[in-house]
Image (cartoon, rainbow, N blue to C red):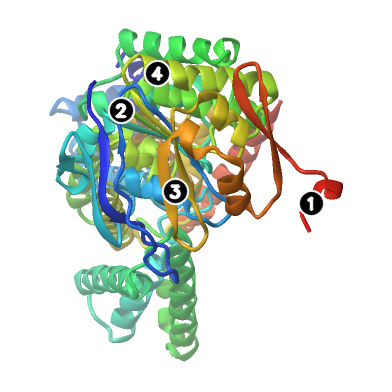
């Protein structure tokens, strides 16, 4: 499980945008990376590039020092899991069937899912508090339940690297915390985790490392403590912020109009 | 695997029963005992001729064509991620029809009509794929749109040929367009194609299940998306071409049989694809029995019957599934 996902002079291919700053970073086992940036900064495109789903403009992404294009897709799928922001559910399927697709990379064409696979999927569903919904059709789930189901599918996939695009989307506060705890626990268990987030405060509480993506292609990254400073975030979002310390974590609040600097 | 066997056993029994009905019923009814005698190599000479030379080939052709259309429809629905897709959605039947009608207008024989239909179907497949693929992007929407437009082009050509064709040829042309098993000579090609298709598609079933959830999701779970999509496209097109060449463009089976099965059996393609082969075959075999007996000695186009049987059955299942 001790495999890192590393980029080398990576330039993500965003049509119509200049190259910007090449990325040289590594998501190592035990780390939780948060990718922050305003809408349109290319967070999702970066995540898809890291997953090998779209080619980079230049540079490479490597897993365990082997560039992604040299991996067999199925071998890669046993090591790298993605929680997408958008989903297409196709034909009606039950919650359990949807969690079970996470076992696909482990099965040969003629294999049916074993009792062990089903037990694994059930545990993943229970871990995300979906245990009672196994036979429900996916189309009847709420947005938050569907989001948790996506996480359960990746949990059943047992990857060493987790890439998640806004995993707390649609979730109420308690479930946001539960999901961030789950992802942090994956890191503690030896996975590398990389999340696109909109909520600075979730990032401040749970991420060990931060990548700031600016709309013009500029980027900076490093340990969370060094990156989450008021000036950098104000610059990132074009929004005045006020920082405070609470319960051992840094908290950022939009500044009120009265306190806007002239 | 245990989960798959009971429904497939029931459908296989239904298909065999449909075959038995198809060879037993007709202008000369053959009772089950006499049928058994023929099947085991005995029986009266009249019965032997009726069963082995007339009814069995036609019934087997119906079984194969129904199965081919249902499997091709199920594959197209997965490929295009669109429940309204059927084997003809990409203009395949139109291309086949233009080929067949042109051959009829030229006064060519049955074998050449079939050959022209097959060529037309393949031409349409290549045309739609080439046009949709033009700039490198290959989305289901683009493929679907290209197919629909190409199909309407073929439709205009068909109408043109019907308008200028000599009156005495019109009934033959219309029967071909509506689908007719009377000219199906040898069922073996179609049966072989069906067997190969099902044997090849079932191991890919789990990949197809995941592909139906979108290409990105499929790719991160280890599915080779582009080769699989190409494979489905080529396979579904060939199956449809064989079916259309054997019996004309029979509507409805390819659209509705997969959906009926999904309503009853769920959406696992490992089950749906072999089930579609059996259910589509059984449905078309029974429809053909009705087509040749309802107003005997005249025959109806079998496409009329598939719709008359399938529409109420489908609506009933759809209605029940909501309750």
Q: CA distance from mark 4 to mark 3?
A: 37 Å
The spot of residue B210 in percent (x, y) is 38, 37
Earlier sequence position, callout 2 versus callout 1: 2
Q: Which residue is mark 1?
A: A260
Q: Nearer the viewer, mark 1 or mark 4?
A: 1
Q: CA distance from mark 1 to mark 4?
A: 40 Å
Q: Secondary structure at mark 1?
A: loop
Q: CA distance from mark 3 to mark 2?
A: 21 Å
Q: Which residue is mark 4?
A: A186
Q: CA distance from mark 2 to mark 1?
A: 53 Å
Q: Residue furthest bottom?
A: B164
Q: Is residue A48 visible?
A: yes
Q: CA distance from mark 4 to mark 2?
A: 20 Å
In the image, B25 versus B172, the foreground residue is: B172
Characterize the local packing of mark 3: few (<14), some (14-19) or many (20 or more) Cα atoms within 10 angstroms: many
Q: Residue furthest right?
A: A258
Characterize the local packing of mark 4: few (<14), some (14-19) or many (20 or more) Cα atoms within 10 angstroms: many
Which circle marks residue A105 in the picture?
A: none
Instruction: Identify the subunit bearing mark 2.
Output: A
Instruction: Identify the subunit bearing mark 3.
Output: B
Q: CA distance from mark 3 to mark 1?
A: 56 Å
Q: Nearer the viewer, mark 4 or mark 3?
A: 4
Q: Secondary structure at mark 4?
A: helix
The spot of residue B203 in percent (x, y) is 23, 33
Q: Which residue is mark 2?
A: A104
Instruction: Identify the subunit bearing mark 4.
Output: A
Tally of marks? 4
Which circle marks residue B77 in the picture?
A: 3
């Amino acid at each position: 499980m001790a495999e890192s996902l590393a980029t080398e002079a990576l330039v993500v291919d965003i049509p119509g945008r200049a190259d910007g700053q090449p990325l040289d970073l590594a998501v190592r086992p035990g780390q939780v990376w948060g990718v922050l940036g305003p809408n349109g900064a290319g967070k999702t495109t970066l995540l898809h590039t890291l997953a090998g789903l779209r080619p980079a403009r230049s540079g490479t992404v490597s897993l365990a020092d082997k560039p992604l294009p040299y991996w067999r897709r199925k071998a890669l799928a046993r090591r790298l899991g993605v929680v997408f922001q958008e989903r297409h559910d196709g034909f009606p399927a039950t919650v359990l069937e949807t969690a079970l697709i996470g076992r696909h990379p482990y099965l040969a064409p003629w294999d049916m899912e074993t009792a062990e696979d089903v037990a694994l999927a059930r545990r993943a569903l229970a871990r995300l508090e979906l245990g009672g919904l196994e036979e429900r059709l996916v189309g009847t789930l709420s947005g938050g339940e569907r989001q948790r189901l996506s996480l359960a599918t990746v949990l059943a996939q047992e990857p060493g690297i987790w890439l998640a695009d806004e995993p707390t989307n649609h979730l109420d506060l308690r479930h946001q915390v539960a999901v961030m705890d789950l992802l942090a626990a994956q890191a503690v268990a030896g996975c590398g985790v990389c999340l696109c987030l909109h909520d600075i405060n979730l990032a401040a509480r749970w991420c060990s490392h931060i990548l700031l993506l600016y709309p013009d292609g500029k980027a900076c990254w490093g340990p969370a403590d060094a990156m989450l400073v008021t000036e950098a975030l104000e610059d990132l979002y074009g929004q005045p912020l006020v920082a405070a310390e609470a319960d051992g974590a840094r908290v950022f609040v939009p500044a009120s109009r009265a306190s806007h600097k002239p | 695997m245990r989960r798959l066997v009971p429904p497939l056993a029931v459908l296989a029994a239904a298909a065999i029963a449909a075959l038995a009905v198809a060879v037993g019923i007709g202008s000369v009814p053959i009772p089950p005992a006499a049928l058994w005698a023929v099947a085991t190599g005995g029986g009266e000479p009249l019965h032997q001729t009726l069963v082995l030379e007339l009814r069995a080939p036609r019934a087997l052709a119906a079984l194969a064509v129904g199965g081919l259309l249902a499997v091709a429809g199920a594959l197209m629905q997965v490929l295009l991620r669109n429940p309204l897709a059927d084997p003809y959605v990409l203009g395949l039947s139109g291309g086949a029809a233009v080929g067949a009608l042109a051959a009829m207008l030229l006064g060519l024989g049955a074998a050449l009509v079939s050959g022209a239909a097959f060529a037309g179907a393949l031409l349409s497949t290549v045309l739609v794929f080439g046009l949709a693929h033009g700039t490198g992007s290959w989305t289901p929407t683009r493929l679907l749109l290209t197919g629909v437009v190409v199909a309407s082009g073929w439709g205009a050509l068909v109408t043109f040929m019907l308008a200028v064709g000599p009156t005495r040829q019109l009934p033959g042309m219309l029967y071909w367009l509506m689908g007719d098993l009377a000219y199906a000579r040898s069922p073996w090609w179609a049966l072989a194609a069906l067997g190969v298709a099902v044997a090849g598609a079932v191991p890919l079933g789990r990949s197809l299940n995941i592909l139906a959830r979108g290409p990105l999701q499929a790719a991160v779970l280890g599915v080779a998306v582009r080769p699989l999509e190409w494979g489905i496209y080529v396979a579904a097109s060939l199956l449809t071409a064989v079916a259309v060449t054997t019996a004309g463009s029979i509507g409805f089976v390819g659209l509705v049989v997969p959906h009926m099965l999904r309503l009853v059996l769920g959406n696992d393609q490992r089950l749906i694809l072999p089930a579609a082969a059996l259910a589509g075959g059984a449905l078309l075999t029974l429809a053909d029995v009705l087509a040749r007996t309802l107003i005997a000695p005249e025959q109806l186009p079998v496409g009329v019957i598939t719709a008359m049987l399938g529409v109420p059955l489908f609506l009933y299942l759809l209605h029940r599934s909501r309750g």
